Image: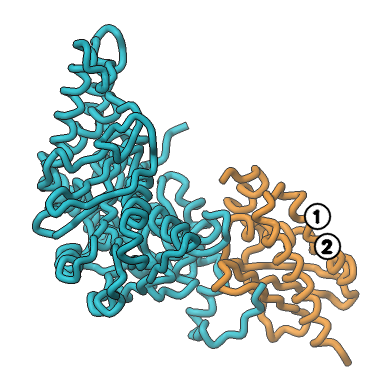
Chain colours: A orange, B cyan
Amino acid sequence: MAYSDKVLDHYENPRNVGTFENEDDGVGTGMVGAPACGDVMRLQIKVNDEGVIEDACFKTYGCGSAIASSSLVTEWVKGKSLDEAGSIKNSDIAEELALPPVKIHCSVLAEDAIKAAINDYKSKHQD
Amino acid sequence: MKKPIYLDYSATTPVDPRVAKLMCSYLTMDDGLFGNAASRSHQYGWDAEEAIEAARKHIADLLNANPKEIVWTSGATESDNLAIKGVAEFYAKKGKHIITCKTEHKAVLDTCRQLERHGFEVSYLDPQENGLVDLNKLKAAMRDDTILVSIMHVNNEIGVIQDVAAIGKLCRENKVLFHVDAAQSAGKVPIDVEAMNIDLLSLSAHKIYGPKGVGALYVRRKPRVRLEAQMHGGGHERGMRSGTLATHQLVGMGEAFRLAAEEMASESERVRLLRDRLLKGIEDIEEVYVNGDLEQRVPHNINISFNFVEGESLMMALSELAVSSGSACTSASLEPSYVLRALGRSDELAHSSIRFSIGRFTTEADIDRAIELLHQKIDKLRALSPLWDMYKDGVDLSTVQWSAH
């Protein structure tokens, strides 16, 4: 399979690889996928008092397109409000990375990961 | 751009230059050896026939068979189809039950599926965890109406060698025909159709340094095995497979088999040393699993799962190496390798598998580079893997509630 230059770039030089302390009040963690399906993404966001995502990081077990999709969204969510980040669509990711049809599920997973991270953060701040 | 290091000899091999040179002399007017072996009336036909019969003998010699028992085909897939459908159709009055194994090549499995649509019954045996067929299970599966057992000699994905001699004995005792797909074993391990009681055996040229597009089927004469032809026409190959014989292809296959017979022992030893060098070079990497039996396997194939690293991303990282993976992402179906799953390997390990296959033109430097790359890239991908983090934190991944998708 031929990969787009953008997938290769994110795969070779993944952005924002890492882990935030989950106990930290300002951190939201989203983990989606399953090893049995061949991909697991863990996306974390760090949200400031104004409700803006000031940092994001990820780790992904999966194919090159899954790694690229999660790397890309860590770049995209930075500086966005939770609502803005929550409105990122998998089709935007797929288009940016020129994913072929069999890899669309990677972008779906990345969208799910953002939503899961936002929900985790919100559940920590319900009161 | 520099080509990657070729470590995918189980997929196909380059044609040996000695084979290619000989094939070229059977193509043009200059050499005058392009004839149709069915032309009985002139020198061109006689010369082609002579070359083809010499090639046929080389094939037979490698199997301890008679040249009259060799039927030319377009490859192992056609041989499998001809053997299984040919026997099923001819012996349907005797019985309609066939036994095979879940780890067979698709050319056997899909042929069996097709026969099921035509009223045949097929038992698909589960292999043991090491990939080998359980003889007791095979015996238990045999019925009065069983007409054929089809078991491959060497598995294409994991390289394990089935005990075909024991299976052949069991089949003979029970008066069941025995077909062996030997595409991956010919020229790699000894084959003796007499000692092993094999009735039908499929061969391919391109797995042993011959050209693509040509193969053969061994069909036993004593006691005689009958087949219903699948390709009709001029009645070539004693009516079993019509079509003008491709002189240069058959000469190439014959030469490849002749060389294999000559060099098998020394080549196996050389390849085994390279395989051991690779295994030794990566033994310090944690969580590495060899798939398939460690002893009962061909030296040139090694299938390894690198836990917590996904196979396709590892292949991408190993772009300097031409290897293959059992990962779902390498197939259109998004299913991980059915062979590894049949062995009872977890989906995670199946997704994390890479097949290295070594061959005639692999060097020590190739293996050393592969070892170096594996260390670098496994480290890199595990640093990216949330599963590796969890494993290092002592989390038992099988107890985690995953959100399946």
Residue A92 marker? 1
Q: Which residue matches tag 2?
A: A88
- Which image quarter: residue B151? bottom left
Residue A22 marker? none
Image check: B402 left or right of B99? right
Q: CA distance from mark 1 to mark 2?
A: 7 Å
Q: Residue furthest bottom?
A: A127
Q: Residue at x 33, y 67 (%)?
A: B99
Q: Quadrant of the C terminus of chain B?
A: bottom right
Q: Are marks 1 and 2 on the same chain?
A: yes
Packing grade of label 2 (10 A; few <14, some 14-19, many >=20) is some
Q: Residue at x 47, y 31 (%)?
A: B1
Q: Position of residue A28 (x, y in %)?
A: 75, 78
Q: Amino acid at mark 1?
A: Asp
Image check: B307 left or right of A26? left
Q: Chain of mark 2?
A: A
Q: Position of residue B170 (x, y in %)?
A: 18, 70
Q: Position of residue B57 (x, y in %)?
A: 13, 35
Packing grade of label 1 (10 A; few <14, some 14-19, many >=20) is few
Front one among B262 and B172: B172
- Which image quarter: residue B21? top left
Q: Amino acid at mark 2?
A: Ile
Q: Residue at x 71, y 76 (%)?
A: A30
Q: Is residue B21 visible?
A: yes
- Which image quarter: residue B231? top left
Q: Are marks 1 and 2 in contact (CB under 8 Å)?
A: yes
Q: Is residue B7 visible?
A: no
In the picture shown, does residue A33 fall above or below B205?
below
Image check: A48 left or right of B281? right
